[in-house]
Structures are given as C-alpha cells and as structure tokens.
Amino acid sequence: MIKYLKFSLFHLLTLPFLLGIGLGGNWKALGFIVVLLVVVFGDVLMGDDLSEPAYAHTWLLNAQLYSALVFIAMIFVMLLWSVAENDVFGIGQFIHHYTGYDALAARAGNQWWHFIPVWLGAGLLIAIVGTVPAHELTHRTADRFAMLIGRWLLAFSWDCAFAIEHVYGHHRYVATLKDPASAPRGRNVYQHIIISTVAGNISAWAIERQRLTQLNLAVYSYHNRYLRGIVMSLLLSVVALTLAGWQGLLLFSACALLAKALLEVVNYIEHYGIERQPKQPVRPYHSWNSTKRISSWASFNLTRHSHHHARAQLPFYQLKAMPDEPNLPTGYLGSILLALIPPLWFHLMTPKLQQWDARYGQKCEAKD
C-alpha cells in the first residue's frame, strides 16, 4: 500500500499546522517548522525516487486528490478561528471537551508575532494542499467534476486564472518569450512573481475572451470562467469577513497572496533560463526536473516536470522520473529557498545553464 499512501504526505503535513493553531502561543510555529524540516531535510536524507510502479487501484490516488478540498477547508476555518472574537463553530469548546485543554484561553494569549509563522505555514500549505492537487485536476479538462474541485482549490489562493492560463497558455508557450511563467535568464524571483502574476492574468483573460467569442457567447456573463473564478474567491473572502471580521479577511488575504506568490516561485524554478523556439515541439529537456523523494510524494509527482510537459495529458501516477533530464539543485522546497537568495541561485544555475546550452542549445537553434 505504500505506493498509494505515499501521496498522502501532504495531508499529514496539514495536521501539525492545525494542532499548532489549537495550542496557541509559540506552538503556532509548529506547522511551518514541520513542513520545512520534513520536506527540505527529507529530500536531503531520503534521496531520489526513481520508481515507476503500475497502479491497479487508481481510485485510491484520485480520492487523495479530491480530499484536498476537505483539508484546505480545515486550514481556512482554523485560520479564521485563530483571530475571531467568537468561538467559530464551537472549535474551542470541542477541543476543551475532548482533551481538557483550554484552547480559548490559549488563543486569548496570542501575540501578533505568533501569526508570522502562521502566515508562512498557511501560505505553504495552501500552495501544497490547494494549488498542487488543483494543477493535476484542472488538467483533466474533460472531467467537469475534477475541474470544479480544482477551481475551488485555486480559489483559496485567488488564482482561478491558473486553470485557464496554465493549461491553454503555459503548456503551449513554455520556455518561449510568449510564456509569462517561464523566467528568462537574469530575472530574479521577486521580479518574476510580479511579472508572471500580472502577465498570467492578462493571458488568462485573453484566452477566455477568445474562447467565448468563438462560441458566440457574451464575454461578461456566467460563461466566463475567469470571472466565475473571481467570484469564487470573493465568496471565500465574504465567509472570512463574516466569521472572523476584518482580522479574518486580512489574514486569509495575506495567506492567499503568499500561496499565489509561491506558485510563481515554483514556476520560476521549473523553467528558469530554459529556451525553446516557438515552432519546436516541447521536449522533456524544456523544464527543470527533480527526482527527490519527499518533494515528489508531497506534490503528486509535480517534480517530474520534464515528463509532465512532454506528455501533459498523462495523470500524475503515470509520469516517469527521467533522471537524465536537466535537474534542479535539490528538491522543490529547497530550490524555492535557494531562489529567494538571487545571488546564490544565479551562482548555482549559471553552470547548469551552460551545461544545458552545450547539450541542447544546438537543437533549439536548428528549429529557428
């Protein structure tokens, strides 16, 4: 069963965060610390996962994908409870009744600095528990239920545009100047977060407008998936405001923005500096890959990005490891931390890009 249950790692990473919120005080840092320790050091200690098993019971894997909506809802509710004036859904009383721990008293003693690791942890988890499963589900464009769940997962990071731009824009233009998510050489990650977010939304709007025009449907209508996505995120914001006041809305918005920024950091590390001519077919070497075990388990094989871009229609459990393709310096979260220090990132990636040019550059030039 391990080959099925390994993808439930992201569910388990949610539990220390929820526990820390309930305990209050310095315990609020528990979720953030556990994610960092498990994923970053896990990649270092646990090595690579090159296995490519066959799965007879794919419903078990799909159940883990869809259950992400339950876990992200729990993160959302506990965030609001932590700053609400009232006991949202009686959570504090529930904890006290079944454990004897006075969670409401602990909450009352929270200080503002306790919410810094809460913000960091929630941003990370919304990206892991929300965006990563949503990425897989929104690729299943023929499955309306998968698309619905995927878009609700993205709503928690105010990024339903991703379901449009990523599938119909990014995969078409990856590693070219037309792709907002592909960072050119020399661009640092902080620039990329802004540029890719703005350009990605513009691209999503243009793609959706073109689709509706071709179908003779009104752009400003229910049929517009971009506008529906905004409404979905607005509804979550209204819930946050209703349950926890302005503090809840502010905390949720800050966590959502961080999760969106993390998505753009992931885009950055996945494609930084790699170049492709527009008419050249997308090959595995047009993305940075990673075979680190824990990153793979915690991201539904998103780390197997080389094969994902070469065969975007394949479900995550059919992706191949491809260890011989261009590889990141380490796993995903480790590479994110490296990218946040641009001089260090450039120092590590410049020789990798030189190797990439020597091995693949002529293939790109041949298609020019």
Image (cartoon, rainbow, N blue to C red):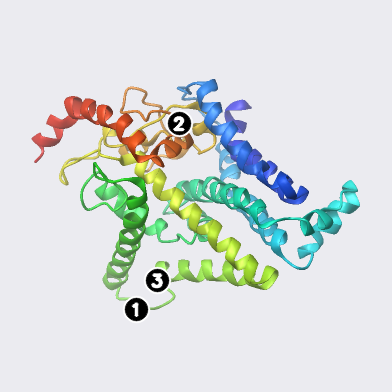
Disc 1: which residue: 218
Mark pair 2, 3: CA separation: 37 Å
Q: Residue 48 or 355: which is nearer the viewer?
A: 355
Q: Which of disc 3 and disc 2 is earlier in sequence?
A: 3
Q: Which of disc 1 and disc 3 is earlier in sequence?
A: 1
Q: Secondary structure at mark 1?
A: loop
Q: Residue 67 or 99: which is nearer the viewer?
A: 99
Disc 2: which residue: 331
Three-letter code for the amino acid on which mark 1 is drawn: Ala
Quarter of the view holding residue 349: top left
Q: Label 1: few (<14), some or many (≥20) within 10 Å?
A: few
Q: Is residue 189 visible?
A: yes
Q: Is residue 148 visible?
A: no
Quarter of the view holding residue 196: bottom left
Three-letter code for the amino acid on which mark 3 is drawn: Asn
Q: Secondary structure at mark 3?
A: loop
Q: Residue at x 81, y 62 (%)?
A: 90
Residue 365 x %, y %:
10, 36
Q: Which of disc 2 and disc 1 is earlier in sequence?
A: 1
Three-letter code for the amino acid on which mark 2 is drawn: Gly
The reply, left or right, for residue 245 in relation to residue 361 is right
Residue 174 x %, y %:
27, 46
Q: Residue at x 62, y 38 (%)?
A: 33
Q: Residue at x 30, y 60 (%)?
A: 199
Mark pair 3, 1: CA separation: 8 Å
Which of label 1 and label 2 is nearer to you? 2
Q: Is residue 27 above or below residue 96?
A: above
Quarter of the view holding residue 283: top left
